Amino acid sequence: MAERFETGRWEKTTCQCPKWGDVQTCGPANHHAVGTMLQSAVIRLARRWTARVDEVLAEGGLNAGQLAVLNLLAQRPSGLIQREAADALALSEAVMSTRVTGLLAAGLVERQALKGDRRAHLLRLTDSGREAAKLWSACASCVQYSVESSVSLQDLSTALAVLSRMNAALGAHDCSVTTDADPAPQPRGCACMPGPVSMLGA
């Protein structure tokens, strides 16, 4: 699709921004068009990826957002204030509250009010929550592998570098990725390598 754009031709464009007024940019004529296509592709990928993870997690009564909360709390055995957890996941307190409510009902998380501040609540994983985090994180990793295996490591590294630079241009903070020394135990029926993702118990 990119072949339809001319290369080597430069043009000046002016955007009328409500905040900054007239903003002039100068660059390759096809730069903005390809950038717009990339933005749409990233949004579609994020939505479809999340939807696929949600399908896998549905068997455990979870979704990708709730698993993110479980994984965050798994890194903080002593607990985390709900407001801090929301900030760590870049969520509003309202969205965080909705996710936590479901986890509380499932018995995966416990919440207690902090002394001296009735509005603040400390979140901790229950024993069931820790087991669920390990089990369903492994299943989510199956989806990740099925996506990653479709491209080379070099392409993944290039995509990460490009998106990181664009993310930095937006003034956002890059997320540092940490990996465990030992891989998470694989649940029964979760076919990670090779082949498509299979549901638990299938």
Image: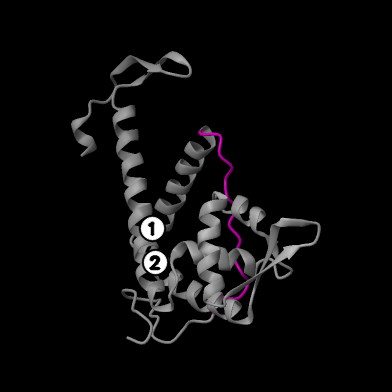
130 to the left or right of 40: right
Amino acid marked by disc 1: Ser
| Residue 202 image-quadrant placement | bottom left
Residue positioned 50% across, 65% down in the render? 66
160 to the left or right of 121: left
Specify whether residue 176 is painted magenta: yes
Rendered view: 199 above or below 16:
below
Task: Tell me the CA gap for discs 1 and 2.
Answer: 22 Å
According to the picture, the residue beneath numbered tag 1 turns out to be 152
Rendered view: 58 above or below 33:
below
x, y percentage for residue 125? 64, 73
Viewer-side residue, 30 vs 80: 80
Specify whether residue 107 is painted magenta: no
Q: Residues within 10 Å of mark 1 (few under 14, many from 20)?
A: few
Earlier residue among tags 1 and 2: 2
Viewer-side residue, 93 vs 198: 93
x, y percentage for residue 25? 40, 17
Residue positioned 46% across, 51% down in the render? 157
Residue depth check, mark 1 versus mark 2: number of the one nearer the observer: 2
Q: Residues within 10 Å of mark 2 (few under 14, many from 20)?
A: many
37 to the left or right of 113: left
Amino acid marked by disc 2: Val
Rendered view: 10 above or below 106:
above
Q: Residue furthest left?
A: 4
According to the picture, the residue beneath numbered tag 2 turns out to be 53
The quadrant the N terminus occupies is: top left
Residue positioned 38% across, 16% down in the render? 16
x, y percentage for residue 49? 36, 59
| Residue 184 image-quadrant placement | bottom right
Span colored in magenta:
170-184
